[in-house]
Image (spheres, grey):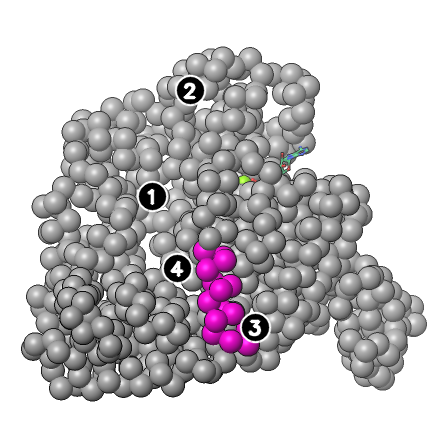
């Protein structure tokens, strides 16, 4: 089996072989990124089938995303001696897909409520009935519900200590009821309901336990408590449970992932066989070196060694663009150059970033220059998003007082019902076409005084901004829009609000490039138009396209060239991790330390860096949200004294340790092209600095005075 596996190009080193040959009982493969954990998992499935004649139906193989599940099937399909049929008979998929099938098989006829809009309508109606219409954002409420369900707590178990908690519980209880009555379930219900089913119905549990003699799980570090409980139940009593993961890559904490699950696996399952893999086969030496340096600073981790297997290749390169707009131009330019020179094709590139709002500038550039790319998630442009569109509609209305679509889009910001009000305005307009469209709204009956005032102020605002530069105009619009958002969020649910504000600042950043509103709107329309043509392209998984995604989505994947953009303070680490005041929300335990949050952000940086095979480009824009921002601490931290890559030569042979008597501080700088590293190194009386490896790119550093230059 192993020989023919190798002939198919699937080599395994000794520790990988041992793990693959693991037969029964609990096993844990705990190893760094790119060390072949996923390869071991698929090889072991094949090994069980072809060597031990295990029936494929007895294998349950869990992955974290659908994409990973598909890839897994493909990988297993390539393994020797397996008929396509037997591969098909392995149960593989995500936790959600597998347990949904189970529920469906038991006659559950509910369908998944995936439509965000509908959820929002439910929640908004409930809040309206309860007279707390604008007090909470639906997203934040849903996040709370999800958090509890991932910890096996149904809505009945939500806390009720404070008045806000009581109110939230009441809203969510109603939401659960309506959802159920209408025949829907949420994504999170799948796991929680399956959990209750297995707890309550011994017969079903027996059946699953008998059927699945071998349970294999990928990305175990991101398992959340409900997933863990499900797996525990099914794998019992033989506990032929084989899990692979890397605690340094726990990045789904907001979904309830808990790295203690992987770190305590041995305790939970005494007799666990632990396998360690320590060779990285994915990335070149310098990328692995940088990744090791970056993650070694985290304190809450299981220390692993990770050596590179590839020969020295290109050093990671660094960009320090002026702002995200320039960053996008530079990145796109580099891709265009390499493709037009025939060096690479589009599909070899991936662009990774921390938060969705960081992708606006890149998205714009790609669409403008007609570069084929794929994003995972929303197919709309940034300018059509629900938060952004009303701002754009204000601009449209400022230039064209008769633009009914724009009126329709901005009505909610005046707390007016869209359908009714726009019908009313339309009627009035046909009789009295001289007025500003919005001013018809003043004739609405039942208008409160403050609403009348608001409408008048808004008409004045539209008049005022008409001749402004787009950036100034957007700022004027924001001055009340921010208030509207604050009002929506007055009750402590801050997480979503910050995301909204980031998005709004991104509009400013985009608008700042244009001199007139007209020009800016023409650009927005061009983006929307061109994007329509590209949507179809994005649906084709085989297409030769650049991949653009958040770091979270890139888990487990690999790409020849990776651009990590937005590697600046406030972006990565994200501002929300840096500011304790922003962590007051209910979803994240208020006592959680900032240090832990930063460690979480550092793991994200580690995941991003370790996706790169051949080339890594890290870009740290100088400004973000109009403010100067330093290079991300995750990059700068690798210069800290904890890094052990300074080689001292002893002047005095008898000396063990340095005397600690400082003589001077020298500045060393990296000689590699594009590398921005420099480092202050203290020299001691009895030691001499012999050579210094660059902590960023692995290149050679020289003593010098490039500090000023850099
Ligand atoms: P991650 O932590 O990112 O999920 P992983 O540990 O699952 O990474 P894999 O994706 O399995 O790592 O492997 C990384 C890359 O190295 C893949 O391209 C894989 O095919 C290759 N690889 C794994 N083992 C070997 C080996 N023994 N020889 C050559 N290439 C290997
Ligand atoms: Mg993997």
Position above or below: 377 against 697: above
Q: Read off the magenta span.
A: 514-528
490 vs 272, left or right, is left
Quadrant showing the C terminus: bottom right
Magenta stretch, overall SS: helix
Pinpoint residue 463: horizontal percent, then vertical percent.
Answer: 35, 83
Question: Which residue position is annotated with label 1?
Answer: 227
Q: In whole angstroms, how far apart are the C-alphas of marks 4 and 1? A: 36 Å
Residue at disc 3, CB closer than 8 Å to ligand 1? no
Q: Residue at x 24, y 85 (%)?
A: 456
Q: Earlier in the sequence, mark 1 or mark 2?
A: 2
Q: Nearer the viewer, mark 3 or mark 1?
A: 3
Q: In whole angstroms, how far apart are the C-alphas of marks 1 and 2? A: 24 Å
Question: Which residue position is annotated with label 2?
Answer: 88
Quadrant of the image occupied by residue 193: top left
Question: Which residue position is annotated with label 3?
Answer: 513
Q: In whole angstroms, how far apart are the C-alphas of marks 3 and 1? A: 47 Å
Q: Earlier in the sequence, mark 4 or mark 2?
A: 2
């Amino acid at each position: 089996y192993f020989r023919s596996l190798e002939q198919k190009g699937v080599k395994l080193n000794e520790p990988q072989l041992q793990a693959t040959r693991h037969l029964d009982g609990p096993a844990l493969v705990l190893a760094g990124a790119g060390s072949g954990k996923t390869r071991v998992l698929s090889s072991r499935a094949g090994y069980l089938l072809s060597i031990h004649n295990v029936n494929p139906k007895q294998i349950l193989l869990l992955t974290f995303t659908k994409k990973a599940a598909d890839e897994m099937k493909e990988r297993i399909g390539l393994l020797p001696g397996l008929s396509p049929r037997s591969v098909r008979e392995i149960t593989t998929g995500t936790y959600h897909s597998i347990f949904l099938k189970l529920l469906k098989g038991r006659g559950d006829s509910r369908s998944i409520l995936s439509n965000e809009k509908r959820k929002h309508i439910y929640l908004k109606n409930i809040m309206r009935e309860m007279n707390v219409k604008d007090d909470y954002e639906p997203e934040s409420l849903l996040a709370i519900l999800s958090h509890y369900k991932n910890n096996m707590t149904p809505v009945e178990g939500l806390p009720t200590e404070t008045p806000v908690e009581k109110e939230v519980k009441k809203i969510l209880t109603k939401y659960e009821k309506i959802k159920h009555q209408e025949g829907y379930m949420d994504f999170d219900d799948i796991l929680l309901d399956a959990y209750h089913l297995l707890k309550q119905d011994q017969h079903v549990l027996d059946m699953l336990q008998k059927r699945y003699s071998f349970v294999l799980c990928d990305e175990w570090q991101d398992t959340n408590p409900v997933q863990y409980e499900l797996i525990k139940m099914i794998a019992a009593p033989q506990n032929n449970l084989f899990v692979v993961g890397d605690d340094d890559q726990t990045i789904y904490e907001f979904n309830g992932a808990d790295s203690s699950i992987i770190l305590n696996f041995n305790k939970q399952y005494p007799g666990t066989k632990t396998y360690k893999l320590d060779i990285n086969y994915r990335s070149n030496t310098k990328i692995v070196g940088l990744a090791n340096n970056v993650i070694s600073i985290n304190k809450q981790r299981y220390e692993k060694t990770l050596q590179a297997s590839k020969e020295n290749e290109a050093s990671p390169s660094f960009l320090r663009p002026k702002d995200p707009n320039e960053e996008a131009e530079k990145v796109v330019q580099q891709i265009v150059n390499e493709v037009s020179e025939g060096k690479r094709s589009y599909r070899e590139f991936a662009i990774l970033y921390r938060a969705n709002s960081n992708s606006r500038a890149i998205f714009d550039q790609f669409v403008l220059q007609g570069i084929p790319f794929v994003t995972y998630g929303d197919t709309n442009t940034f300018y059509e998003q629900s938060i952004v569109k009303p701002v754009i509609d204000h601009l449209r209305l400022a230039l064209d007082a008769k633009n009914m679509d724009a009126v329709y889009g901005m009505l909610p910001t005046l707390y007016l019902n869209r359908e009714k009000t726009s019908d009313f305005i339309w009627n009035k307009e046909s009789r009295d076409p001289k007025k500003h469209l919005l001013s018809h709204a003043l004739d609405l009956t039942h208008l409160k005084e403050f609403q009348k005032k608001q409408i008048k102020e808004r008409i004045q605002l539209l008049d005022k901004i008409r001749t402004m530069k787009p950036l100034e105009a957007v700022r004027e619009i924001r001055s009340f829009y921010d208030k509207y958002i604050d009002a929506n969020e007055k009750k402590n649910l801050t997480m979503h609000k910050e995301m909204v504000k980031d998005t709004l600042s991104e509009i400013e950043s985009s608008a700042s490039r244009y001199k007139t509103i007209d020009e800016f709107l023409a650009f927005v329309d061009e983006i929307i138009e061109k994007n329509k043509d590209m949507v179809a392209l994005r649906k084709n998984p085989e297409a030769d396209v650049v991949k653009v995604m958040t770091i979270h989505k890139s888990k487990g994947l690999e790409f020849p060239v990776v651009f990590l953009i937005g590697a600046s303070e406030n972006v990565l680490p994200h501002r929300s991790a840096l500011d304790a005041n922003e962590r007051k929300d209910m979803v994240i335990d208020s006592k959680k330390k900032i240090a832990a949050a930063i460690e979480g952000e550092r793991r994200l940086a580690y995941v991003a860096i370790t996706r790169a095979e051949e080339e890594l480009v890290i870009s740290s824009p100088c400004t973000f949200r109009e403010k100067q921002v330093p290079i991300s601490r995750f990059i700068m931290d690798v210069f800290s004294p904890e890094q052990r890559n300074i080689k001292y030569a002893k002047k005095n042979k008898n000396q063990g340790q340095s005397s600690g008597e400082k003589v001077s501080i020298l500045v060393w700088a990296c000689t590699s092209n594009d590398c921005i590293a420099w480092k202050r190194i203290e020299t001691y009386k009895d030691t001499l600095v012999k050579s210094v490896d660059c902590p960023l790119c692995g290149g050679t550093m020289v003593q010098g005075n490039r500090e000023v230059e850099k």
